[in-house]
Image: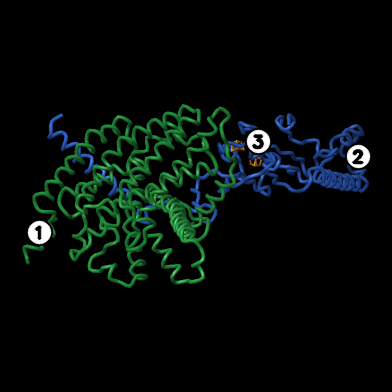
Amino acid sequence: MGLKDYLYDIWEAVATTAKGMRITARYGVDPRETITLQYPEERWEPSERFRGFLYNDIKTCTSCTMCVRVCPVDCISLESVRGADKKMVLASYDIDIGRCMYCGLCVEVCPPKSLKHTSGYEKASVDRGELILHFIHEDAGEIKARVAKQVAEAAAKAEAEKAKAESEKPEAEMAKDGDPDSRAAQKDAPPPAGGNPEGGGAAEKKPGEEKE
Amino acid sequence: MMESLAISLVNAVPVLSGVPLWTITLLIMVMVAAVVLTFALTYSGLATYVERKVAGDIQARVGPNRVGPVGILQFLADGIKLLLKEDIIPAKADRFLFVLAPYLVFVGSFAAFVVVPFGVGLIASDLNIGIYYVMAITSLVVVGVMLAGWSSNNKWALLGGMRAAAQIVSYEIPVGMALLPAVLIAGSLSLQDIVRSQGGLFGIFGWNLFHNPFTFLSFFLYYVAALAETNRTPFDIPEAESELVSGYHVEYSGIRFAFFFLAEYGDMFVVSALATACFLGGWHVPFLDAEALPALWGNLFSLGVFLGKTLSLVVLMMWIRWTLPRLRVDQLMRVAWKYLVPLTFFNLLGVSLWLLLFHGKGIPQMIASLFG
Ligand code: SF4
Ligand code: SF4
């Protein structure tokens, strides 16, 4: 190594050090460079398409079970019964958020768009059970019983109305049909109000839930 | 100095005349030592806080800000944490050496505070071999570091200890050589004398830094070599957390680790204080002679000036640390033996010739004499 290289080495060391120190000094003095967010007090606004915890608006949910079927990790489970007005009534709707991988498939698939991602992402618990989000806080059994009662009432009402109608103009009907067999057949058919007389028989249950 | 203090104390307070003089002298010594140690520990604690703040700023972070206002009490929290931690001694370690090592390192670095000239009259002991004393006592650090590495019975610790030994021994030569110009100019090894030699009416130009081109260079050479002696980045080969985990103190925990930690910051201060005293005029400032002020104010003023200069150099060390990456072992040795050692020798020769040719006059002095 010649003298020239030797001196050049020294010069290079000094120059590069000075350059680096100028950069760090700029970062050190300029408060605008600080990007740390003091988390619990300040936080980033999550983006619009952020997939946070799921939220189901049970008023618009039609209990179609699409979300249950599509979820790759089986974290959604729901139970529903057919109500007096022939619509499905949700008895329970749970999402195990601890198992969810936020793929968003259930949100994509939901026909009335009642299932949504929220921007929530903060949750801690000491028990896995606490990670299951319940969207219906009433007891499933109570709802089923209530719906069954409504259905039974509706059925009884319909029955009474039919009986009334029959007693009012039996002759006319007899004259029309003339066949007593048709009346017997009508009596065996399911009540016109629909639904299950037993109540809750139409519960949709996920196989995953049974495993648990 | 202590004895004269003791005599004046006895004269001032007649009740003490019955007490033997040596007891009073001893008491005063212990008190002075306690004051210096308290200062050193407080400084070290605050320096860790400042270092973390500087690191945070440079890395676009915030740094500690939770404990106390702007996090200033963080060092107390850390200290308490270290005190409460379990003190682990590895089963296969050499217990005696393992326990001894932190104290050697700590003593080696903090004993040097004794001769630091904080102010006009603020020096624990104005030894007439001040610089030699510092060089000698700080060598205890390398013994402690090596013992720590050896006694831990851990290959990383051992590697770290060996590297530390090689590094500190190598860099002690340029450190000594770079300090000698100041000694030559002052004609004394006492740090207080060296500081006094840089006074005068030239203000900032009385400082050794501007005495002649060689001393100017000498300051920077000293600073680089001293930085290496404190084992800090970019010369932190002995610790090298990314390759040696943490080097020689990898097995230490709790209060013993705290000793190593404090010693590092103590070292930084001593090294910066020496640079201040030898090149930056110590407690001298332009146009104001602290020695001419009344004793109390002169002392306070000079203390402030000295601490200001020294602590700026300490902050500069932190700035360097958070800027530069670590050198490789061979690069480290190359810097020492191929660059620093020859250059400091060259400088020493240059300063000696200068003093011989110009009868000890510096450039500012010569310019001043030109104008009468
Ligand atoms: S986001 Fe994906 S994993 Fe989570 S519940 Fe919906 S389908 Fe299942
Ligand atoms: S897909 Fe939507 S509407 Fe259907 S059950 Fe799930 S949440 Fe309800």
Residue B160 position within the rendered picture, expressed as x and y whole percent measured from the top left: 41, 32
Q: Quadrant of the N terminus of chain A?
A: top left
The tag on residue B366 is 1
| Most foreground residue, B62 or B190 | B190
Mark 2 vs 3: CB contact within 8 A: no
* Residue picked out by circle 2: A174
Frontmost of labels 1 and 3 is 1
Please state the horizontal and vertical placement of residue B359, each as a whole percent of the image.
11, 54
Q: Quadrant of residue B232?
A: top left
Query: In the image, are marks 1 and 3 on the same chain?
Result: no
Mark 1 residue crowding within 10 angstroms, few (<14) / some (14–19) / many (20+)? few
Protein chain holding label 1? B
What's the amino acid at mark 1? Met
Say which chain tag 2 marks: A
**Apparent side of residue B370 relative to residue B124 in the rendered image (left or right):** left
Q: Colour of chain B?
A: green
Do the residues under discs 1 and 3 have CB atoms within 8 angstroms? no
Q: Nearer the viewer, residue B157 or B318?
A: B157
Amino acid carrying mark 3 in the image: Cys
Whole-number angstrom distance, CA of label 2 to CA of label 1: 140 Å
Q: State the residue position of label 3.
A: A75
